[in-house]
Image: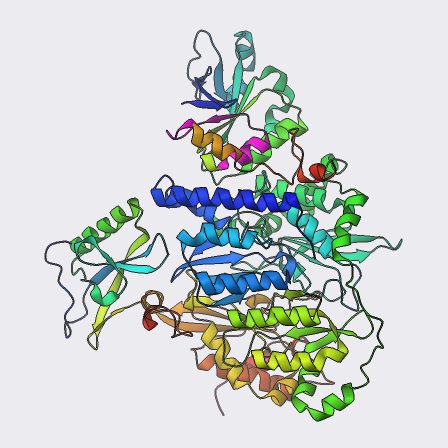
Amino acid sequence: MYEYDEFDAEFVDQRARQFARQVESRLSGELTEEQFRPLRLMNGLYLQLHAYMLRINVPYGCLNSTQMRKLAHVARVYDKDYGHLTTRQNMQLNWIKLSDMPEILLELASVEMHGIQSSGNCIRNITADEYAGVAAEEIEDPRVYCELLRQWSSLHPEFSFLPRKFKISVTGAEKDRAVVKAHDIGLRLHKNPAGEAGFEVFVGGGLGRTPFIGKSIRDFLPTRQVLSYCEAILRVYNQLGRRDNKYKARIKILVHEMGAETFGDLVEKEWAEIKEGALEIPESEVERVRGFFAPPAYESLPDEDPDMAAKIAAEPDFAVWERQQTAAHKQPGYTIVNVSCSPVGKPPGDISSAQMEGFADLADDYNFGELRVTHNQNLVLTDVRKKDLFPLWQKLVSLGLATSNHGLISDTICCPGLDYCALATARSIPLAEKISERFADQARQEEIGEIYLNMSGCINACGHHHVGNIGIVGVDKKNTELYQLMLGGSAEEDASLGKILGPGFDEDGIVDAVENVIDTYLDLRENGEKFIETYRRLGPDPFKDRLYSAPA
Amino acid sequence: MGAGANPVMDGETVGMHQVVIANRLTDGIVVFLGRDRRWVERLDDCPAAETSEEADALLALGVEAENNQEVVGPELIEVQVRDGGVEAVKMREAMRTKGPSIRTDLGKQAGN
Amino acid sequence: MPLLKNAEVIEDPYTRVPGDDALPAEGAVLVDLARWESDREALIARDSAIGVRLESSQAPAAIADDLDQIALVALDFPAFTDGRAYSYARLLRERHGYRGEVRAVGDVALEQLHFMDRAGFDAFELGSDQPLEDWLTAQSDMKLWYQPTGDERPTVSQLRRR
């Protein structure tokens, strides 16, 4: 993991002191709310339905156990004993006091954490593949470039008052777990015929009111030019992005209205002027940062644990968990472990202080002290010895973190919705809970197989409903909740946007509707197709017929 | 408080009853404009305006409190009396008066 | 309007001449881009310092060829949230090599000074009557920067290598 040096630490301290000064100015009235609002947003502080909400950055999803313990402590002392993992790999606390913020920021700074630019019209948290560095099919570890992008984007003097928020994501594997095609800039590491690593650059992806899949404007960008190229993109956007209408201000609108080719030409023109300048990353700097992401001290182990078969035979629940939650690792004898924060009947992505502390201990005992947050609102331990899986599982069970639903229907993405969020038009969490209860049966979930169900409590799509295989969005119809169902989205390298199937449903109807969709799929699938494959083969009609035709 | 604004009585027909809601500046907690310009944490403790003049007067007090760094975002919401208690009419506003529906152990509904 | 420049508050030596208003008999003037484009020769002939004011929709490329005639470029912030002028300031300094005064005008709030400072602004039209110390504090809250700009300040990368 990246470790702060004296400069990084001083930077965050200066920022914390600056915000403390600004909070004082706000409380004394020297700053009005209108003046203060962008300043607090740029430190991650929202005013939501019930209280202030603090969004703490988890840079490209990477945390260590010390930081996790600090998050538990902050949640316990300053909040109500729990946090929420977000679709940008961050953590949110829902009950923060403005008057506590100076102290909270100092606490976070002491473990190299902050909320800098987790909100505001600036470059937000850089997100990445949660398997970065360990996925068996990885081309190159994206974390190096994420860290370089993180520093470059932190309090960038030119790009702190953009037309709107700006989100960058990076992937380095064949399978895209970082949703790069739905980001303002998506970067996909790959190798050219000469074997050199470079980025395919996507721009103008995004969800929300007007969703778009990102357009590729450059097939191969040498990795050392990633900062200069992003600077060129941002400079074009900062000057030409719309500022007349908040809902038309993202780069996706600019790219769409101008055309990706024209936009790409402007970027190339600007880039030509700066690419040989100070933003070209020296090889020595890439190597220096890469050093922070060197593989941990792996032991030499046989690829399989000889006792695994016995353990699996002895404990059926362990067998299910091992089958569902582990993923292939580069290093023999090691495995990736997905830890579900979506238990049946509970808010997806919520984790208590006690769970955070327990999990920090597991990270220390089994994972070299590190852990990851995923955009699916779950956790990952990336480097677990296969022979440790059984004791790890037992401890996860005692923490309530052993749900075996990775990639299954109850492993939903769900935004906070009207239960917490000032922007929401409908509740989303109760729906996620109902659906997970309807599909609680493990065997049934595994029968259904890999499927991504995403739900949002408003059209802003923080729950990524456009790129769910099944997407649900809640709207307000005459002061009651109405849920629209869409099918066919995908957040991966085959990214696609879902389409609304038909008229919406009330909060009970939508659960039945999802079940009907699943039953239709199960009836019609062929040759072990996943849901999205069946949908793409057959289109929406069979599902429409099942849901909307009059009963016989 | 505008003259003539009385607490909403049980059994009264739902007319235009409005209160001012805001977030307290220091801690973000939802508060309502009560008697004597005091901000209270429970909707029940809050007299409601019955005419648009009263409502405007209440809102003006809310804005004044915002200018004095007491609250943020004062706005009028419609309330009604039901089963002896005062409720916000709109979903979103009802949520703010109670707390998250999926954590009934948190917020005003739980007294914390 | 008081002006903050070189850590002090000074009187503005320029007279703002909006639109097609008559130019004063003598002295430095600050005109809009349209006026510069239509009365260029007359302005130069006055033999006094010329300032050109750009709206937030007017990129400095419009005056790039004339910068040796222009002693002041004022970049407007119609709202402090409109951040186009940060790019304009950097382009003036780094692309066009401009050495004259780059002044932030309009909705200039003290909490933006430290960004403006690094983007290449060297003068700020003060929008409130906050004391000078507050402005100077806000300008120098942050002393470490990751990004290279046109100023000579070392970035964190450069400091690391020392």
Q: Magenta region: which residues?
A: C112-132
Residue C127 colored in magenta in the image: yes
* Residue at image location 63% in from the left, 44% down from the top: A234
Q: Can residue B83 be seen in this view?
A: yes
| Image coordinates for residue A376, horizontal then vertical, percent | 60, 69
Position of the N terminus of chain C, as image quadrant, is top left
x, y (%) of residue C46? 52, 7
A188 relative to A482, above or below: above
Residue that appears at 38% across and 46% down: A33
| Number of numbered labels in the structure image | 0
Whether A473 is drawn above or below C16: the answer is below
* Residue at figure coordinates x 50%, y 80% from the top left: A345
Q: Residue lying furthest right in this view?
A: A194
- Image-based side of A532 in relation to C49, left or right: right
Percent coordinates x, y for residue A30 in the rendering: 36, 39
Front residue of A540/A191: it is A191
Give whichever of B72, C66 is nearer the camera: B72
Q: Is residue A114 visible?
A: no
Q: In which quarter of the image is residue A216?
A: bottom right
User: How is the protein colored in the picture?
Assistant: rainbow
Q: Closer to the camera, A201 or A157?
A: A157
Res A425 → quadrant? bottom left
> Which quarter of the rendered picture does the C terminus of chain C lie within?
top right
Residue C94 is covered by the magenta coloring: no
Q: In this view, does A18 lie above or below A49?
A: above
On the image, the x and y values in percent for residue C61 come to 62, 28
Is residue A350 toward the left or the right of residue A378 in the image?
left
**Which of B40/A359 is in front?**
A359
| Residue in view at x 33 percent, y 60 percent | B30
